[in-house]
Amino acid sequence: MRLILAILLVVNFAISAVAEEHPDYGPEIPSATGEPHPQGNEFMRKFHMDLLSHDRDLTMYEGIRDTDASLKSCFDCHAVTDQATGNPVTYEDERNFCRVCHDYAAVRVDCFMCHRSTPEGFNEPALLKSRLLGPDDGLDDALFTELAAFVANLE
Amino acid sequence: MERTIYREIKATQGVWTLGIILLGLVGLAGLSVLYVEHYGHAVTGMNNQIVWGLPHVFAIFLIVAASGALNVASMASVFNNKAYKPLSRLSGILAISLLVGGLLVLVLDLGRPDRLLIAMTTFNFTSIFTWNVLLYTGFIGVVALYLWVQMDRSVHPKFTKPAGILAFVWRLVLTTGTGSIFGWLVARPGYDAAVMAPLFISMSFALGLAVFILVLMALFAMDGRELGEAILKRMTNLLAIFIAVVLYFTAVQHLTNLYAAEHAGIERFILSQGGIYTTLFWGVQIVIGALLPMALIFGGTPGSVSARAGLASVLVIIGGFAQLYVIVVGGQAYPLDTFPGYEVTSSFFDGEIASYTPSVYELALGVGGVAVALIATGLATKVLRILPTNLADKNLEG
Amino acid sequence: MQDERPLDPSRRNFFKSGAAAVTLTLAPGVTVMAFGGTAASAQGADAGKRWGLLIDVNKCSKDCEACVTACKDENGWEGKGKAEQNAQWIRKVTLKDKSTGRESSLPVMCQHCEQPPCVDVCPTGASFKRKDGIVLVDKHICIGCRYCMMACPFKARSFVHEPVNNQKTFAPRGKGTVESCTLCVHRIDAGRIPACVEACDATGNGAMTFGDLNDPESEISKALTAYPSVALRDDLDLNPGVRYANL
């Protein structure tokens, strides 16, 4: 067990070393507004979900609403604006702050099935049909359109 | 009198064809699940009035039939009825397969099937659903143990009976749990009755045996093995008794409700003015699913014993589906009685009979569950020594 | 590696208990800071309170939908699909007495029972009652089985049948999970009254009273002692937090 951990640790370091030497290998993280996190970016990259899960339980079960970590406060600084429209981009857009790294790491984000993915107050446009399950659900709308047409024929 | 020998079935062309058809049905079910999960339950016929629909009818049918399919084994090892002994293995395999098929349908119809892990790890012990999660998974384990005790020659036969008793008790508790999903719902006039648990147990006896008879006949026919009339007669006679028990509990359910003035509304709905539900109740559940098969079994004409056994089993299964449809969907279609003594109207269908038209996706999912159960059973008989080679009359014991 | 994990829920109270800034040193070089807000808002749900509503049916006007509209706007659940599949956190119900023909109208929403059947039947515990009596759904662990909808005697819960976006920050909702009236818990936590009550007051009908049922001095408690009121389906003994007068 320890051996495996040690190996993983070495691999991990090796990867981060490579990533540091070749910054262009990694995702291009959009710059944020506001004060930097006092804990540092490395900490946030690693633990943002722990912070969010912890504080969401505080809010939901205890009714404590002035927590530090919330999706709302993420988007206060981390909204990515579309230069053409001047609007923040939703999770459907691959430039969305969360997606940049999550697409790169191939880790699916479940948050935006229920939460909005833009700052409060912005009126998010209607969902694109092909992105209903999230952009990474790998399902093609065309397949389903055909399926639905086939079924409609049957009925 | 030959010794009972268990052998794998041969991979005949018929087996292959059936397997491919069933796999195709599973594929269609898979597509339907993806479709529904992609667009949400908006594409199904289910809504905020009828929250459980056709998938739940299929799932409950399979789960109830699963516990009933085990009865054949129980007849042998719990009630010492030796004639059923050669069928015990198939009984156990079929029980597990049907349960897996049913659970699959249930799970794939969840709003968030991706959170199955949460359902398996986060428990709320005041919920009968939670207990059912444990009872269902436990059932698979207990029946697997029971099969192992029967099939491993290094295990002394004296363990068969205790294992059989454990499995029998477990299945009774399991069906009680399934019936209590409805029986413990105080909110709805169609449910909220202790009789739901014994009613479901009686249904499991009848439906499980009917499915077992059909599967047994199909497997023997495909493999060219001899299935005597004597064993079929025994099973259909038992089936007729089980049908009578279902009728008895159904009568108790409705008579109890009829006696209470507050439940007169739901009874009038189901028994006389419910349209499709009334037709399903009297026409399909009672006449086609109970009276007709009893007449076939006891009447003795027309056709051969095996033809009548097959037909009676098919009818019992159709009747069982109708009964579950009336309980699950009909019970929800009748409006909640939140304001006794008032006529209620609202923008949210209060006081109205809810409408439900199942979509083809729900049907495909349900049929897929049945197909999975049949594939699993077939596969098990193909790779394991489940089926006895000879069930001719002269080979029947006891 | 272990010590690096910044937080676990058991530290929840410690972490956010006071108004002052709390600094936690978790591992050498790793510090987490949490800043409290005002004492009142940091307190959150109060176990000593039991929030409730009193609805005076006589004052509720038949054609008025103000509470429903306000709730839709506040929580963003306006449905665009089929009527049978759309969510309905609060609805106006019209009653006609079968024997006398007298008509009345009243809003029905989650009754925030003391013994909620939806909480009893939920297999994962997603359906829960907050310590101040508000019944909520934890959508992070809701699997969408809809058993709570089967169990609710008031038809108060809705299943989200279609994909959703553009939610309100404080009212997340999404496809495949169940939802219902939250008694505007986000407003209560901020010391405000639910949107429906506010809207009802604004129409001048004043049919809805919100307050703490445990506080004998609250307006709602005084009204409940002074006038007769009923709970819906009181035969079930669920002790709902929502009461109706003049029904």
Image (cartoon, rainbow, N blue to C red):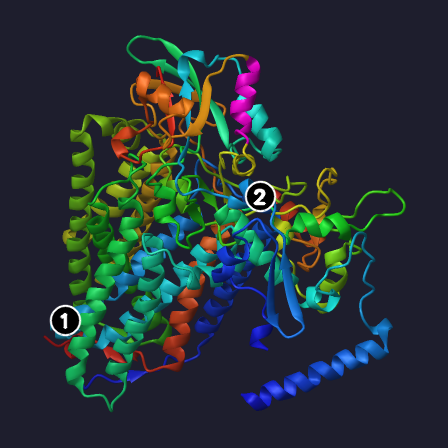
Label count reads: 2
**Residue at x 52% of width, y 13% of height:** C63
Horizontally, residue B284 falls left or right of residue B360, namely: left
Label 2 environment density (alpha carbons within 10 Å; few <14, some 14–19, many ≥20): many
Residue C139 placement (x, y as % from top left): 52, 49
A145, B395: nearer the viewer? A145
Magenta segment: C192-203
Task: Answer with left or right where residue B62 lies relative to residue B349.
Answer: left
Element type at mark 1: loop
Instruction: Residue C196: say if magenta.
Output: yes
Which numbered dot is residue C173? 2
Residue A108: quadrant of the picture: bottom right
Front residue of C106/B68: it is: C106
**Is the residue marked by circle 1 packed among few (<14), some (14-19), or many (20+) residues within 10 Å?**
some
Q: Quadrant of residue B216?
A: bottom left
Q: Indicate whether residue A11 is drawn in magenta.
A: no
Return the x and y of residue C77 as percentages of the image width and height.
59, 35
Q: Chain of mark 1?
A: B
Residue kind at label 2, given as amino acid type: Arg
Q: How far apart in space, not on screen, are marks 2 and 1 (Cα)? A: 52 Å
